[in-house]
Every structure is written in structure tokens, then in C-alpha cells.
Amino acid sequence: MAGILITGALIIPMDEGRPDYFTGDLLVEKDRIAAVSDKPGSVDRSRAGRIIDGRNLVLMPGLINTHGHAAMTLFRGYADDLPLKEWLEAKIWPLEANLQGDDVYWGAMLSIAEMLKGGTTTFTDMYFFMDRVAAAAAESKIRAVLARGLIGVGGGSENSLREAEELFENWHGAAGGRISITLGPHAPYTCPPAFLRRVMALADRTGLPLQIHLSETAGEVRDCLQEHGCSPVQLMNRLGLLAYNVIAAHCVHLDERDIAVLAENKVGVAHNPGSNLKLGSGIAPAAALLSAGVKVGLGTDGAASNNNLDLLEEVRLAALLAKGAAREPTLIPAKTALQMATAGGAAVLSLPDTGRLKEGFKADIAGFDLAAPHMAPLHDPLAQLVYAATAGDASLVLVDGEVLVENKELTFLDETKICAEASRRAYRLTGRK
Ligand SMILES: [Zn+2]
């Protein structure tokens, strides 16, 4: 297969050892980046079956969303402005009890369509009917890190462990390696220690990483202190869970010892600033985590608590919140914020060869349109992406070397049908005629 050559673009490689940005050409061959040149016109054009004029584009590694619940797009705007516990127990869980596999498929498709159009090339999901999410990911050609959500209280926990193992057997490494499976114990407060030991045994058998919600609210930490005499992070450490490859979502309420434990155990943190703000959970100490050497990626969380899946918005929030909370404008500068959404996210998810524009890396690429009033003048493309751009500026998106968005349109997914099907199913669930 002949390659795709993007010429004359502004390139932000997120590649240590190279400048932060330069004008150049990028060649894709099969699923990989074959060349990233800072000399426009220097790549041999005979290697390209297709040439894309990149002069109005800034290219960066595709955005990596490290935490979410894709099918919750169905509940976007259904229940807002409520405390987390009431929101979950009175609004979300009753609807989720009636979800069918096809609802989850179309909810995930809606989410994928939105993410691709915003420059996101990898998403992370913890939910149920995950075989249907895997099917949606495979068909849509996005990259996905999926987990069957596991709850160790009430009925159904046996069944969920079996489904997690089946998901691993049927989907791990599927779709040319674009789909990877993780284990998803929901949270310390829904997964008692005995159940977490069973999840760890499954991790031993499969070698899979774990993803878990951790220290999301002050109430969770208070309850854990009362019940176990230590913080959720310390409890997970005591149980041996942090010795595994762990993606910890939220980590809003941490003390200095918690941060040291996360660093020591090389835990990856999924920072979800928008969701944490909307649910009134607080502000995660992202700058302190980074300076302690913790891997930090960014996530949108589900669309019911965000309410969009615009990862650039999370990039901006991460930078702004760190500055505002500490009254220190030098914290989380633009490059660090973009790094969290790209190479940092790849490290959190243990995805090899993604998150950078570098020869030999996966061709997961996001190109943002520079031809708009809010993108002019262009003094610093990194600052522009972080502080001025939005999802709607994503114009060209490739995953595994395939063009999935071009000129701001999905190249083969039927957006009209996806929006209609997902909306119809959402209205059935909420009882709206
Ligand atoms: Zn979540």
C-alpha cells in the first residue's frame, strides 16, 4: 500500500530531542509514521500514493482519552447539577438497569463519532455490554482500551468477572491490535477487599492492567478512613493492588503520602478536570503529581458528567485549574498540558509506540485547522491549541494510518444515522415520547 504524505504542515512532534514545533512533511506508510521531516519537500514523493496539502494544518499526535464511559453519551444533559451520590443513585443507575446491548453499541458509536471529530484517536472505557463497545470500536477504526466494569457488592459480581475474562479472550489485541482489554474494578467503595483479591487473581492469569476510580470525592476518603483507618490509595497499596499495572481515575483527594505511594508504584493517573468540576468533586493536584514523577493523562469521564468529549477542553482546564488553584500561572504550561493528552496518556495506558509523531510510531495523528479567526495570529502553535482551539477545529484525523476524519467530516461513519439511533434509544430509556 502506498503511503500518505502530508506536506508543509506545522508539526508538533511531542518527541524529546526535537524542537517543540517546525514546518515540515509527514509520511505515513501502512499503520506507521515513516518520516517526520523538518525540511518541507525533502520526503521522496514517489513513496506516497496520496498527498495532502497540510499548509493550513497543525499536526500533533492524536489525543488520548484515558478515562470514560462511552455509552453514557445517551444520558448527556439528562441529569445535571446534582451531587454525585444522588446523580448516580436516583438518576443514572435506574436508567442503566434498563440498558440493552444495542443501546450501549449506539451510545458508544455516538461517543466515538464525537471523539474522532475532536481529534481523539484513543479512548478508554469502563462499562458493561463491553463486547458491543468492542464491536463499535472495531467498526469505527478508533483505538480503544476497554474494561468490563466490575462491582463486588450485590448480585452479578460472579457474572461480571466471567464477562471480563471472555472480553479478554475474544477481544484483547483484536482489530489489528487497536483494541486492548483491561480489568475494571469500579472503585474501592464498590469492591470490597475479598473481591479485589479475585480481580488481582484474574490479572495474574491474564497479565492485564487494571483501571479503577480512586479518591474521587472527599466523602469517599472520609468513609474509607472510618472503615479501614487509611485513605483509599493506602488501602489499595496495603491490598497489593498497586503492584499491578494500574490506571487510577480522578485521584482528586490525595495527601502527600498518597502521592508518594502513587509515584513509587508507577500508577498512571487519569485526570478528569471537567467531570470533577461539574460533580463538585474538587480539583485534583495534577501539578503536584507531575512534579512527584507520577504519570498523568487526561480524561473526559462519561458525557453525563462533562457533558462533551472534547479532550482539548480538558487540556485547557488542566492548565487553567493548576494555575488558578495555586495562584501560580507558571504551573502546567501549554507543552505539559499537551503532553498529558498525548505521550503522557500513552504512558498511562501502556500503549507502546503511540502518543508521539516519530518514525516507527503508530500513525495516530490529529490535524487542527489554522484558518479561523480564533487561530490568528499564530505566535506559538502549542499555546494556540491549549488556550484557543476547540474540538471543532480538528480537520484531519488518522488512526493506524487510515484517514477517519477529513475536512472536519467523518470519512465513512454515518453521522446522521448514529445521532438518530442514539437519540431514539436515549428517549426510550428516559420515557420521553
Ligand atoms: Zn468514571
Image (cartoon, rainbow, N blue to C red):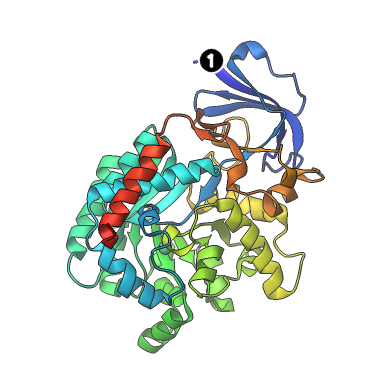
Residue 211 in the image: state x and y as whole percent.
40, 59
Q: Is residue 133 visible?
A: no
- Give the residue number, with chain letter if any, for mark 1: 2
| 433, 98: nearer the viewer | 433
Q: Residue furthest front?
A: 433
Query: Could you tell me which residue is drawn at 36 percent across and 77 percent down?
Result: 86
Q: Give x and y (percent) for residue 404.
A: 49, 32
Figure quarter occupied by ligand 1: bottom left
Q: Amino acid at mark 1?
A: Ala
Quadrant including the C terminus: bottom left
Q: Which corner quadrant of the image does residue 143 belong to?
A: top left
Point 50% across, 23% down: residue? 30
Q: Residue at x 49, y 41 (%)?
A: 116
Q: Residue at x 30, y 56 (%)?
A: 427
> Along the line of sight, which residue is nearer the eye, 196 or 424?
424
Above or below: residue 93 compared with residue 110 = below
Q: Quadrant of residue 189?
A: bottom left
